[in-house]
């Protein structure tokens, strides 16, 4: 499909993988051999070199985690999003840039986010604030940190660039934990940041809704929207694993001690009986989902030297260290401190 100027819309660079490619460039600039990291994530150089190649969300998340550890940059996604050419986002950028107002652009972002990232669904909301919430589909939220930080920074930059205004946020929240200094996050977003929140969200004052987009092109927007609608229709929506939905709901409830079946069922809009039945169709139980999640999270948290054992116990919903230690020994055969020493 081509626009009136002859641009081949089917050959737009794919935004699925832009942050992976940026991370590869950064690693190469710092003299890091990226091929071994790509292989560990199930990727290859050919996928990186082809801007139209779609990179799976899980592979992207894994590669970013590997690259961040290798580069010793705990805020890799945040840093990568600061200076890249926003046109690299591809089709979605031009949809937003041709919209009439920032409100319309945010609504378009929510509607067509699946075209550029199959693992994150955006929800538009308005009321006391206007903005977007980010929901994970088909991938475990706890595995990600860098992709979500990249996405929120990039989206904020787009809003500011398209309106030619330094729009401050009113609320920014991430469901993952962050213990180190977050001053640069506050400086960029212009508001307080919450980590370990119940939702991933980016919000602005409702007063920005009618702010016009500089260079809006109504005719181009109609064409791009038509193309996006066709892409969504052809691709269809892949049903997400119910077990993953339960896991993502449990993740944000664990530190608050509210990861109970009834609470999770209400959060997902089903009854406890339906929750159990749908998990059973995937050969799962609520207890098995929670136990596997706690085990995986514990191993991940233990690699973060900024977290003490008592803090990890709290993040997993345990009232004391001894209860966590007992559970961790049951899962791995080792005490948490011994596992951390081994990881070192």
Image (cartoon, rainbow, N blue to C red):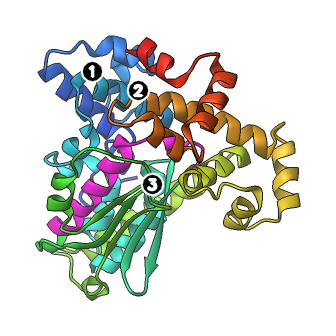
Q: Is residue 239 visible?
A: no
Q: Residue at x 55, y 37 (%)?
A: 321
Labelled pair 2, 3 in contact (Cβ < 8 Å): no
So how many labels did they put on this image? 3
- Measured along the vertical axis of the image, is residue 283 above or below residue 157? above
- Point out the frontmost of discs 2 and 1: 2
Labelled pair 2, 1 in contact (Cβ < 8 Å): no
Q: Is residue 53 visible?
A: yes
Going from N to C along the chain, the mark reached first, 2 or 3, is: 3
Q: Residue at x 35, y 11 (%)?
A: 36
**Which numbered circle lies on residue 175?**
3
User: CA–CA distance between discs 1 and 3?
Assistant: 24 Å
Measuring from the top left, give residue 209's x and y in whole percent. 30, 84
Q: Is residue 49 left or right of residue 43?
A: left
Q: Is residue 147 magenta?
A: yes
Residue at label 2?
303
Labelled pair 1, 3 in contact (Cβ < 8 Å): no
Going from N to C along the chain, the mark reached first, 2 or 1, is: 1
Q: Residue at x 51, y 46 (%)?
A: 315
Q: Is residue 152 left or right of residue 80?
A: right
Residue at label 1?
70
User: CA–CA distance between discs 2 and 3?
Assistant: 19 Å
Q: Residues within 10 Å of mark 1 (few under 14, many from 20)?
A: some
Rendered image quadrant of residue 159:
bottom left
- Measured along the vertical axis of the image, is residue 333 above or below residue 252? above
């Amino acid at each position: 499909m081509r626009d009136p100027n002859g641009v081949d819309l089917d050959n737009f660079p794919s935004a699925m993988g832009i942050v992976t490619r940026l991370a590869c460039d950064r690693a190469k600039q710092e003299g890091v051999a990226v091929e071994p990291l790509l292989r560990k994530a199930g990727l290859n150089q050919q996928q990186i070199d082809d801007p139209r190649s779609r990179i799976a969300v899980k592979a992207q998340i894994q590669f970013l985690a590997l690259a961040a550890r290798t580069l010793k940059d705990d805020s890799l996604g945040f840093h990568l999003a600061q200076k890249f050419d926003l046109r690299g986002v591809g089709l979605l950028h031009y949809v937003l840039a041709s919209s009439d107002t920032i409100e319309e652009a945010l609504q378009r972002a929510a509607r067509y986010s699946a075209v550029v990232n199959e693992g994150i669904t955006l929800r538009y909301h308005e009321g006391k604030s206007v903005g977007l919430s980010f929901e994970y589909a088909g991938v475990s939220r706890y595995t990600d940190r860098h992709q979500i930080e990249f996405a929120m920074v990039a989206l904020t930059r787009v809003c500011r660039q398209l309106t030619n205004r330094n729009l401050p946020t009113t609320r920014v929240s991430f469901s993952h934990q962050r213990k180190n200094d977050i001053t640069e996050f506050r400086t960029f977003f212009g508001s307080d940041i919450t980590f370990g929140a119940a939702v991933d969200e980016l919000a602005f004052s409702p007063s920005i809704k009618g702010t016009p987009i500089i260079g809006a092109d109504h005719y181009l927007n109609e064409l791009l929207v038509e193309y996006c609608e066709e892409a969504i229709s052809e691709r269809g929506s892949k049903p997400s694993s119910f077990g993953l939905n339960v896991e993502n709901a449990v993740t944000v409830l664990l530190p608050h001690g509210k990861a109970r079946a009834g609470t999770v069922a209400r959060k997902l809009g089903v009854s406890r009986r339906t929750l159990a039945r749908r998990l059973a169709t995937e050969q799962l139980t609520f207890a098995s989902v929670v136990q596997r999640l706690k085990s995986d999270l514990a191993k991940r948290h233990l690699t973060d030297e900024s977290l003490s054992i008592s803090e990890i116990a709290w993040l997993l919903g345990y009232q004391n260290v001894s209860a966590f230690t007992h559970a961790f020994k049951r899962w791995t055969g080792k005490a948490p401190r011994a596992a951390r020493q081994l990881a070192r």
